[in-house]
Amino acid sequence: MSDIPYRNFKSYVKSAGNIFDIMAAAYKVLYPFEPMVPMGQDPSLHDFISCFSQQHNISQAFAELKEELLKWLSKQDSLNKDKLREKLFFLIRLIDGKCVRSEKSFLPDSYTRYFSLNHLFQNEICILPRPQNGAVDLLSESIKKKAGYGFYGRNYSRTSDISGYLKNFVIYRVTDITPHIIIPNYYREILQEFERKQHKLKVAVFPLSSLNLNRIFMLREDLIDKEGLFYIESPINGPEHQILERCKEALRICRNQQVDIAVFPEMLFTSKNQHALIDFVKGNDCYTEEMRFPWFIWLGTAWAEKENKCMVIDQYGKIVFEQKKHVPYEYRKKDNGNIPETGTSDKTVVREALSHKEDRIANFLDLPGFLRIATAICRDISDNHLTTAIKELYTDMVVIPAFSKTDRLTERYVNPLALERIISLVCNACSALCEESEECFEVNEQMIGREHVFSYLCLPAKKPKDNAADYHTAHYTSLCKECVKCCNGYIWEIDFTRCVIHHSLCCAEVI
C-alpha cells in the first residue's frame, strides 16, 4: 500500500471527533474522486459501522469505532493505493446509509446556524444533510403520474462527483461560499400544516412602491473618469414612513389570505423600517392557523454604510438570518449625467458601492421533508460560486429580492435553475422601472392586466411531448390602478399534487 495515503488517513482517524470527521477524512484521501472508482466491499468495515449506528451512547461507541478502524488499517499493508481508495469509497457509502439516526445528535434544535456536521477540514469540506422527500420531489412524482415520466436528475459540476452516490448526505467542497444551514425548531409544525392544506403552498411578492428611488433616498454618486460609485446617504422621511405603512398593509393581506412565504424587493427598506416591522409582527400575537403572518418574510434589503443586507423574519417577528449582497448593481450614464441611448459610446459605468470584506456566507433555510430555501439578492444570482452552492446543496427554492430595470435575471440565471428542479421566487420593485426624469413609474390604462415580467414565480415543469426538462413562469399580471394607495402584490398558490398554479385571475398547469 502507498505509504502517504495510509499515514494520512490513520492520522485523520486519530484526530476525528465524530463519525462525519471519518467521512470527511475518507473523502480527503479520495479527492479528486473519480466517478468510475469501484466500491470495494469489506465485511469488517460493514460490521464496524453497523455496530456503531445501533448504539445509544454515541461518544463511547465512536471511541470504540476509532479503535477498530485503526486496527483494521494496520492490517491493510498489502493494499495498493487503488484498493485503499475503493475501500474508503465503501466506507463513505456505509456512513451515508447507516448513520442517519446518529446524525440527529449533531443538528441544532432551534435557530442555530452551522456549516458542517464534520469538524475536521471545515475550511475545505462540508458534510451536510441532504433534503429528503420534499415538495419538489412531490411535484416530480405528480408530473410523472400525469405525464408518464418525471424530471431528469440534477446535473452538477464540481462536488457531485461523490454526492450523486449518496442518499442522506452531501459532501460540499468549500470555495468562495460558506453555506450556513438554519433549521427552525418548529419545522414539523410547518410540514404538518403543509400536509393539512393538501400540499399547497401560498407565496406572495409585493413590488411595494412605484416612486423613483431618488424620491425615497438621498443618493450620491462619486464619478471619476469613466467609472463611478453610487450609494445611499439617508432616507427621506415622508416616503420612508409611507413605505412602512404599505408594507404593514401587505402583511395584513398576507395574514388574511394565509400566505406562507412573503417577499419584498431590494433597496427600498431602511434598518429603522425593518425593525419597525418586526415590532409590528410581534405586536399582533394571535397565531391561529386562520390568522397568522407568513411562516417566513423576506424584508427586502436595507442599504447603509456601503452594505446592502437582506433580513428574513418568521411569523413571530424573530430574525432568522441576515445576508449581505456581494454583486453590485450598475448602470450607465452619459458623461453629461444622463442615461445614454442604445449604442452611445460616451458613457460612465456607475456601480453600487459595496465594501464587504469578510468571507461570503450563503444562508439556507432548511425545513426537512419540505423545502430547503436559499437567498440571492438581485445580481448575486449571477455569481457562479453561489449558484453552484445552491445546486450542490440540493436547494428546492431560491428567493430573489431584486431592483432591476431589465429581466435578464430570468433568461440567464433563473430559468437554468428551474431545469435543475429549483423553484425561483423573484420580487422586483416597480420603482426600478422609473425613468431618470420621472417622479414615479406611470401606470396607464394600457398597462392594466399586462405582464410585469420582473416579478414572477418560476417552477420546474415538463415539455408536453418529450422527456426534456422545462419551466413554467407565472408573471405578475396586474399593474395596480390603486398603486398610489397601496400595493396589493401578487399571490400564487402552488398545488404540488396537481402541478397547478392558482390565482384569482388564472389557473395554470406546469406541464
Image (tube, grey):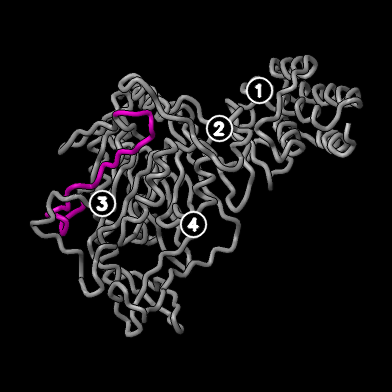
Compared to 362, does 40 lie above or below? above
Tell which of 246 and 223 is nearer to you: 223
Image mark for residue 324: 4
Farthest front residue in view: 466
Q: Nearer the viewer, mark 3 or mark 1?
A: 3
Where's the N terminus, which quadrant?
Answer: top right
Q: Amino acid at mark 1?
A: Cys
Residue drawn 58% across the image and 25% down it:
167
Q: Nearer the viewer, mark 2 or mark 1?
A: 1
Residue 111 showing in the rendered view: no
Residue 75 in the image: state x and y as whole percent.
Answer: 90, 22
Query: Closer to the N terminus: mark 3 or mark 2?
Result: 2
Q: CA distance from mark 2 to mark 4?
A: 25 Å
Density class for disc 3 (Cα within 10 Å; few <14, some 14-19, many ≥20) is some
Query: Closer to the N terminus: mark 3 or mark 1?
Result: 1
Mark 2 secondary-structure assignment? loop
Residue 382 in the image: state x and y as whole percent.
Answer: 45, 54
Image mark for residue 99: 1
Mark 1 secondary-structure assignment? loop
